[in-house]
Image (cartoon, rainbow, N blue to C red):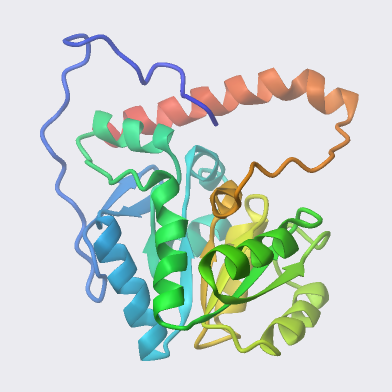
Amino acid sequence: MIGVVGLETPPGSLALPAPRKFEREPGRAFPRVRIGHVPLDMGRLDEVLACIERLVAGGQGGHILTPGVEQIVRAEADASLREALATAELSLAGGAALVRAARVIGAPLQEQGERWLPALARLARTRAWRVLVVADQPGLAEWTACALRDRYGLLSVGVAAAGGSEDGRGPWVDRLIERMALTRPHLVLVSMETPKQELFCQYVAARMQPAVLVGTGPALESLLDRRWAPRRQWALGRLVSAPVRWLRRSLTFLRVLAASRR
């Protein structure tokens, strides 16, 4: 979501609270803050990359998610999404709107922006990792894999994952895992719609160790040399209802954010 209603406030109109007491869970690399039901790790970019390197080098695998406003709103009513986010090895703020919102509750999250995935790709090149790209938009996985080969010199493969159920599992995923396993990847970049992306990463990570899965969402396009613009056909009803859905989502997010301040 581009911007969130009510987050940009004039100086002095909304006093920022003192920094929150962050959660420190045993075995976690970083302290965490919660917005609603969603935990967010507080690591800097260099610390996050070092943590991912340890996950790959240690052979334990796992899944890394990048929740944004959409995930926080959906997690209010979706227990399976909450579990996927809570069990991720890393949960990183997935957008500038969420970073600005976190400041309102005294949580100085790091804004990775477009530096995040290119920096991860450079680390993968340095460590000679095999990278697999999985996307539900037709052509996006293949284009991104080509960009990783051409721009970063990586051994990368793209796999299309169109269709499938929203719960991110089932026979279609098991067949996809068989194809994915042939490449023996160190790193799997996943771009799907929410909540399929998060549930897919959680399910597959447990079956493809030691691979580390990263749910990138639309940020995957930052690895391309130009903006990805696939042809889409939108139903008229969906276009008409889009402003209503946006407003409802914004209001829900603001309610969750207000509750997180207390």
Indicate the quadrant where residue 104 lies.
top left
Q: In which quadrant will I find the N terminus?
A: top right
Percent across and percent down for residue 44 are 25, 55
160, 122: nearer the viewer = 122
Percent across and percent down for residue 250 are 52, 25
Q: Residue at x 22, y 41 (%)?
A: 108
Q: Residue at x 80, y 18 (%)?
A: 240
Q: Residue at x 55, y 75 (%)?
A: 154
Left or right: 81 as drawn, with respect to 41: right
Left or right: 256 as drawn, with respect to 162: left
> Is 103 placed above or below 77 here?
above
Indicate the quadrant where residue 123 lies.
bottom left
Percent across and percent down for residue 121 are 47, 66
Q: Residue at x 52, y 27 (%)?
A: 2
User: Can the viewer see residue 240?
Assistant: yes
User: Can the viewer see residue 88?
Assistant: no
Q: In which quadrant will I find the C terminus?
A: top left
> Is 203 placed above or below 7 here?
below
Percent across and percent down for residue 202 are 56, 70
Indicate the quadrant where residue 47 lies.
bottom left
